[in-house]
């Protein structure tokens, strides 16, 4: 059985956070980090105090997707705490800002790193902490969910049938832990070209999940070169184009988390 990440009470560092939202997917590469980061900056744009915790130790995306001036987490040596870095007022913690190379670690070590980064960071008072979960539903994800009091989960998927099966696993994990899945984001749902709409991965798996599991909201996110480019350039699309179509979608998602 998985070892709990935190033994005992909720760590002091997390006690002043009102809502902890997990953004989750069962596979890599479906756009989970893109959704987590854009959701965080949307909530910040709506006036909330926000932090992002990148819990993906094996493949941290946050350092690519945002470009804080200070790319290294600082330590407070007296309090033995981590001071999050910051980009446009959103507090950021990722293993990718820890100043070490890509890690080769076994599960228990990963849990230890997640524990330290999450619980010893000085989050301060936050309205939302958005957690970019590691992909999958294994031990690391389960322990993280069991010990952090998650307010809500957002599941990211792509339209393929295989992705649907994986998502169902994720939904079951959260429902077992009594964490409400408030929304499914069906990413790369379509693209428009030459006045036509194309569905390269087929249609309907998002709505199937929503129906089957009674999830209240479904959002489509089209394939957009600008979304990919903004992720690579370190400025989330909702920041680069606050009036755009993507920003609108994320505002609706922000309202439901
Ligand atoms: P995950 O966190 O699930 O591994 P990412 O958010 O890192 O996925 O996305 C994987 C890649 O796909 C990134 O390069 C990202 O910019 C790109 N991407 C994600 N969603 C879209 C989209 N809707 N349109 C275009 N590119 C996207």
Image: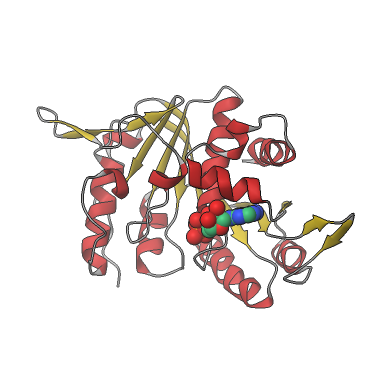
Q: Residue at x 23, y 47 (%)?
A: 116
The quadrant of the picture occupied by the N terminus is bottom left
Q: Residue at x 72, y 29 (%)?
A: 243
- What colour scheme was applied to this rendering of the protein? secondary structure
- Residue 111: x percent and y percent? 27, 59
* Res 223 quadrant in image: bottom right
The quadrant of the picture occupied by the C terminus is top right
Q: Quadrant of ligand 1?
A: bottom right
* Res 31 quadrant in image: bottom right
Does any portion of residue 25 appear in the rendered image? yes
Count of numbered circles in the view: 0
Does any portion of residue 179 appear in the rendered image? no
Q: Nearer the viewer, residue 23 or 234?
A: 234
Q: Nearer the viewer, residue 85 or 122?
A: 85
- Residue 125: x percent and y percent? 39, 25
Residue lying at the far right of the rendered structure: 195
**Residue 75 drawn above or below residue 148:** above
Q: Nearer the viewer, residue 231 or 119?
A: 231
Residue lying at the far top of the rendered structure: 47
Q: Is residue 192 left or right of residue 71?
A: right
- Residue 89: x percent and y percent? 44, 24
Q: Residue at x 37, y 29 (%)?
A: 86
**Residue 163 drawn above or below residue 79:** below
Q: Is residue 55 left or right of residue 193?
A: left
Q: Residue at x 58, y 64 (%)?
A: 171
Residue lying at the far front of the rendered structure: 194
- Residue 20: x percent and y percent? 47, 41
Residue lying at the far left of the rendered structure: 78
């Amino acid at each position: 059985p998985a070892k709990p990440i935190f033994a005992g009470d909720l760590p002091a560092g997390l006690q002043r956070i009102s809502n902890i939202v997990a953004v989750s997917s069962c596979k890599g590469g479906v756009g989970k980090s893109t959704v987590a980061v854009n959701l965080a900056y949307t909530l910040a744009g709506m006036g909330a105090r926000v932090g992002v915790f990148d819990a993906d130790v094996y493949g941290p995306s946050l350092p690519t997707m945002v470009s804080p001036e200070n790319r290294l987490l600082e330590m407070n040596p007296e309090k033995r705490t981590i001071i999050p870095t910051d980009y446009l007022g959103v507090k950021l913690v990722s293993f990718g800002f820890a100043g070490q190379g890509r890690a080769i670690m076994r599960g228990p070590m990963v849990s230890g790193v997640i524990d330290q980064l999450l619980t010893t960071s000085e989050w301060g008072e936050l309205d939302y902490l958005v957690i970019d979960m590691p992909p999958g539903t294994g031990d690391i994800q389960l322990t993280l969910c069991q010990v952090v009091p998650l307010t809500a989960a957002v599941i990211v998927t792509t339209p393929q049938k295989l992705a649907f099966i994986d998502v169902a696993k994720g939904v079951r994990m959260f429902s077992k832990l009594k964490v409400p899945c408030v929304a499914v984001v069906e990413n790369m749902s379509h693209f428009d070209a030459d006045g036509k709409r194309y569905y390269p991965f087929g249609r309907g798996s998002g709505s199937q999940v929503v129906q089957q599991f009674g999830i209240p909201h479904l959002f489509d996110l089209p394939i957009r070169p600008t979304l990919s480019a903004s992720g690579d350039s370190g400025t989330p699309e909702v920041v680069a184009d606050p009036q755009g179509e993507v920003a609108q979608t994320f505002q609706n998602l922000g309202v439901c988390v």
